[in-house]
Image: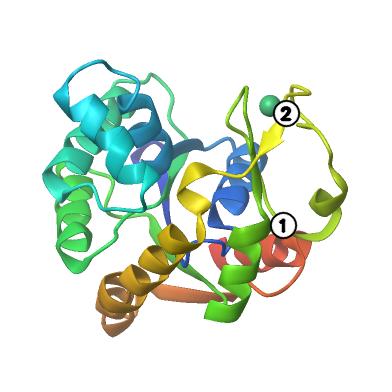
Amino acid sequence: MRRFKQPLVIIFLGKPGSGKGTQAELLGEKLGLDYVGSGDLLRERALKEDFTGRKTKIVTDTGGLIPTPFIFKLWLDKFEELKNRKKLKGFVIDGSPRKILEAYLIDEALEWYEWDKNVKIMLIDISNKEAIWRLVKRRICKKCNRLIPWVGEFKKIKVCDKCGGELIARPDDAPEAINNRLNFYDQRVVKAVEYYEKQNRLVKINGEQSIENVFKDILKAIK
Ligand SMILES: [Zn+2]
């Protein structure tokens, strides 16, 4: 029976600043899962010296939205790469879906790759007030792009704890960009959240706790 079990797919939803990136990383380490983050895929794409590369950089830096077809090209390339792995325990999806169209497309893509039987969808829930505070204060490593959240022990860190690099504010965490992203969440991402909720596929996790306790709740929800 065991060999028929599909890899575990976890989709994290939550406002910017909810800590889903951090949790996705922790979960990946703990369970040996790959990480599929839209933010990382876009930052990587933005390094390419072509029209879409240059435009991706401008749009993400101002908190704008990359259209779904472009995000999905990156996604499908990544899925294909994962599908061709000899051993895949599973992966964590972070940063998508950002709207209901993407929720439909992810469902179809997971079905195509035969990954649709072991999917967990989790919302890490925080208030807008908490989200703004965390986004204004969080930092990123200039060298390795590691995101240092504004929670618990991380507040004391002066340089990157992975590579010693300088910590700076992320360009897309400027106040205007933060506002754009929270508005976008309230208007669009919420629709994807509701889509999963209606199908009884959504697990809500209280995100306004310590990183450790959020993580414990997530592990409980997986079992
Ligand atoms: Zn670093």
Q: Is residue 2 visible?
A: no
Q: Any mark on residue 166, and which?
A: 2
Q: Secondary structure at mark 1?
A: loop
* Marks 1/2: CA–CA distance: 16 Å
Q: Position of residue 7 (x, y in %)?
A: 40, 42
Callout 2, which amino acid?
A: Glu
Q: Is residue 171 visible?
A: yes
Image height of 175 relative to 57, above or below: below
Q: Secondary structure at mark 2?
A: loop
Residue visible at 35% across and 78% down in the picture: 186
Q: On the image, which quarter does residue 179 sit in?
A: bottom left
The residue tagged 1 is 150
Judged from the image, the quadrant occupied by ligand 1 is top right
Q: Position of residue 80 (x, y in %)?
A: 24, 27
Label 2 Cα crowd, 10 Å radius (few <14 / some 14-19 / many 20+): some
Q: Position of residue 69 (x, y in %)?
A: 12, 44
Q: On the image, which quarter does residue 205 sit in?
A: bottom right
Residue visible at 36% across and 71% down in the picture: 185
